[in-house]
Image (cartoon, helix red, strand yellow):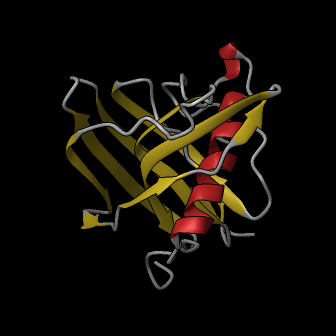
Amino acid sequence: MGDGNWQVGAAEGGRLAARWWKWALSAPADQSPVADTTGAYAGRRQPQDVWFLAGTYGGRVVRRCSIPAGRRLFFPVLNTQRMVVPFVTKPWRMEITRASAALNSSPLDVSEFASPVFQIMGIPRVAWGLWCALDPLPPGQFVLEIDASAANGFWVDTTYHLTVEAA
């Protein structure tokens, strides 16, 4: 697996979080990679420099998708976003009770990032989350498992069956 975790600092992680939300919210509801329960929309409008994996709206999801070799991965373990309104410009941070991610059963580093203010359809927003960033994976099959919950009862249990295809 490459040389492991992609080392992302706070500023870069915040910018990636904002880009991820723009990507995730750019899809029509019927093609949303976040609402997708199979992985069918995982490749929708991916940027050229990174491959985003979608989070979920909660609960258990199993997705299968192919990704190109040579692309770094960035994905949420648990995340939130909200509109910026006067006097409320900080992101909403969830109280986490558990958060982990593993690739082929090997634990991954999980990092906390808050985004700068970003725009979606002219509306300023800000995001927070626990994220993973991975170096490019070699061609082959991988299982990515994400398990997290918040004190408010929100939880995710996501499994990705990834096929990394040679360029």
User: From what the image shows, is residue 84 above or below residue 112?
Assistant: above
Quadrant where the C terminus sits is bottom right
Instruction: Compare residues 94 and 35 and report the one nearer the observer.
Output: 94
- Name the quadrant containing residue 24: top right
Residue nearest the observer in this picture, 153 or 133: 153
As drawn, is 55 to the left or to the right of 138? Answer: left
User: Which image quadrant for residue 124?
Assistant: top right
Q: In which quarter of the image is residue 106?
A: bottom left
- Looking at this rendering, what residue extends furthest in the front direction? 87
Residue at x 80% of width, y 60% of height = 48
- Image label count: 0
Foreground pick, 19 / 70: 19
Residue 53 coordinates in the image, percent (x, y): 55, 46
Q: Residue 32: image x %, image y %?
A: 64, 24
Looking at the image, residue 138 lies above or below residue 31: below
Query: Which residue is found at the position 58% from the left and 50% from the top?
Result: 115
Q: Residue at x 68, y 29 (%)?
A: 25
**Residue 38 x %, y %:** 51, 28
Give the residue at x 58% y 57%.
14
Q: Nearer the viewer, residue 87 or 23?
A: 87
Q: In this view, does 133 lie to the left or right of 52?
A: left
- Residue 111: horizontal and vertical position, in percent? 39, 62
